[in-house]
Image (tube, rainbow, N blue to C red):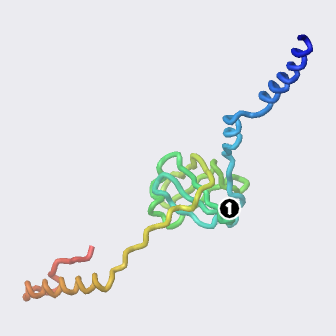
Amino acid sequence: MSACISKRIPGAMLLLVWLVATPSAAEEAKADKRTDYSIPFADHHGIRDWREDGEKGIWIQAASREWYYATFMSPCIGLPFALGIGFVTEPGGQLNRFSSIRVPNEPMRCYFRDFKPSDPPPKRAPKKKSSIKDQDKNKKEEAKGAQEYPNRRAEDAPSTDR
């Protein structure tokens, strides 16, 4: 009986050591959660493109064509209307979660809250071009208006352009 117990103890000890040594699923998830993403040499042509996401964030494309998304600490006023922005990088020249942007004619910088890899920004909807049917319809409406008001000059007519 004592021989049977002594054979089971090393197996149980081995199982206990294995359970303690292997990380749990929660620990693995913590290990995979990186926060140190960056674009190296952002101050030397390291940024290829950028797209605003309203006042809440910005998509940034690195020279390697990888996209990143940065959310701001507070709304970035003026960004949706900006034609150009300035990236304020770290002293080493890399853009990361400690960086910020400058929007022209705005006194404050827009600081990043986080900076992570992302999918490309959604494609913008193309502007609707007027078709030939729409143009013909507009001409007919103008002609109808001229018949209803024969003494009205063209510049006095109500404008249909908006």
Residue type at mark 1 is Asp
| Residue drawn at 63 percent across, 67 percent down | 48
Given the current orientation, which residue lies at the most extreme front position?
1
Residue 151 rendering spot, x and y as whole percentages: 7, 88
* Left or right placement of residue 75 versus residue 3 in this view: left
| Residue drawn at 62 percent across, 51 percent down | 116
Residue 129 sits above or below residue 118 on the image: below
| Residue drawn at 50 percent across, 60 percent down | 52
Residue 35 falls in which quadrant of the image? Answer: top right
Residue under numbered circle 1: 43
Q: Quadrant of the N terminus?
A: top right
Of 101 and 116, the residue lying toward us:
116
Residue 133 sits above or below residue 41 on the image: below
Of 1 and 146, the residue lying toward us:
1
Count of residue discs: 1
Residue 149 sits above or below residue 10 on the image: below
Residue 40 rendering spot, x and y as whole percentages: 71, 58
